Image: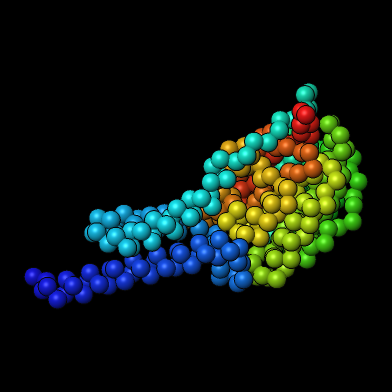
């Protein structure tokens, strides 16, 4: 039998572990409260915020069962803070509807994965899409060569390509004429075009920001550049691609604060995820976004399996917003 002293030591060890968990989750929550994203490790921890919230709730319930009231109070307070932070995902503000009779512009975003050896399957998938525009990220010269030789290229004659090594390449393919603007002030490759859509001109900015683990400074810079686009926008604008950032990153929420609306959140699926799809575990974070501003609204968004990729793609339909009634 276990002696009283051994049981006491075990109880102390378990309580210490519980306090350690609560302290760690509390520290991550404080970085959210004060909008700190100062190191790659902090950024990674922030992406796990909703799951850390579940862990701290479990600790709170266990502490309640064992009558550790101080631990209950602290853990519950942290859990409540995370709940408040995530409320906009569950209860987004109302956005205006599209103008009457809007046809909508359908835009697909596809992360190809630079090492993808199933590009023939991807081309077949793209050939089945009804999208007016396709945004490709992780677009290599090899992907470019294969796709240009496929039937997809015939359907999308208006192409703006910036193929690059590994994950650096980006492209925009369109069935409709486009006007290419100066490239945005991002460290990573991006493309800025205006599409002559069925409801008028729509600016489409395709991005693939670096991961904070690979290049934290450029990741921060590019999210600030996205924020600046929101602050200076002058017409219907769609910012779309792989941001390598989630709602749980303060720098990304700054982009939203600049006037952008996330299409997944606006259409009621704010808690959806897009990465990773190539791991044994299900996707646990949304890194891929379609953001609207400047009088543009998302009317529909649908996630898309992409053969050989480690990201889900998406198809978003956007249209000019109905003017506000006085």
The front one of 225 and 26 is 26
Q: Where is residue 38 in the image (x, y as percent from the top left)?
A: 62, 71
State left or right for residue 150 relative to residue 214: right
* Whether residue 179 can be seen here: yes
Quarter of the rendering occupied by the N terminus = bottom left
* Whether residue 171 can be seen here: no
Q: Where is residue 276 in the image (x, y as percent from the top left)?
A: 56, 55
The front one of 169 and 49 is 49
State left or right for residue 14 relative to residue 107: left
Q: In which quarter of the image is residue 72?
A: bottom left
Q: Residue at x 31, y 71 (%)?
A: 16
State left or right for residue 223 relative to residue 3: right
Q: Residue at x 73, y 52 (%)?
A: 258
Query: Relative to 100, does residue 152 appear above or below in the rendering?
Result: below
Q: Position of residue 204 (x, y in %)?
A: 80, 46
Q: Quadrant of residue 56?
A: bottom left
Residue extending furthest front?
326
Q: Where is residue 308 in the image (x, y as percent from the top left)?
A: 62, 52
Q: Residue at x 75, y 56 (%)?
A: 227
Quarter of the rendering occupied by the C terminus = top right
Residue extending furthest top?
101
Q: Which residue is drawn at 90% across and 56% down?
A: 182
Is the image coloured rainbow, by chain, by secondary structure, or in one colour?
A: rainbow
Disc tally is 0
The front one of 246 and 230 is 230
Residue extending furthest left?
1
Query: Relative to 187, does residue 237 appear above or below in the rendering?
Result: above
The front one of 169 and 192 is 192
């Amino acid at each position: 039998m276990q002696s009283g002293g051994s049981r006491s030591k075990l109880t102390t060890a378990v309580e210490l572990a519980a306090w350690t968990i609560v302290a760690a989750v509390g520290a991550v929550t404080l970085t959210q409260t004060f909008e700190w994203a100062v190191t790659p490790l902090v950024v990674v921890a922030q992406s796990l915020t909703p799951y850390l919230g579940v862990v701290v709730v479990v600790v709170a319930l266990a502490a309640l069962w064992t009558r550790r009231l101080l631990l209950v109070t602290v853990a519950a307070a942290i859990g409540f803070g995370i709940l408040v932070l995530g409320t906009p995902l569950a209860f987004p503000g109302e956005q205006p509807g599209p103008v009457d009779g809007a046809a909508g512009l359908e835009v697909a975003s596809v992360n190809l994965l630079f090492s993808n050896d199933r590009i023939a399957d991807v081309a077949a998938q793209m050939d089945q899409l009804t999208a007016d525009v396709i945004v490709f990220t992780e677009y290599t010269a090899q992907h470019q060569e294969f796709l240009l030789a496929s039937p997809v290229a015939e359907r999308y004659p208006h192409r703006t390509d910036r193929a690059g090594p590994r994950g650096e390449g980006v492209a925009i393919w369109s069935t409709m004429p486009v006007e290419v603007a100066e490239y945005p002030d991002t460290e990573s490759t991006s493309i800025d075009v205006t599409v002559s859509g069925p409801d008028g001109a729509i600016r489409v900015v395709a991005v693939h920001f670096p991961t904070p683990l690979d290049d934290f400074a450029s990741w921060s810079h590019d999210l600030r550049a996205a924020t600046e686009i929101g602050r200076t926008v002058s017409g219907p604008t769609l910012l779309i691609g792989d941001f390598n950032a989630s709602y749980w990153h303060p720098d990304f929420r700054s982009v939203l604060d600049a006037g952008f609306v996330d299409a997944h959140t606006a259409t009621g699926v704010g808690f959806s995820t897009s990465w990773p799809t190539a791991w044994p575990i299900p996707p646990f974070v949304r890194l891929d976004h379609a953001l609207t501003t400047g009088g543009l609204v998302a009317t529909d968004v649908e996630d898309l399996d992409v053969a050989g990729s480690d990201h889900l793609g998406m198809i978003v339909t956007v249209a000019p917003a109905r003017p506000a009634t006085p």
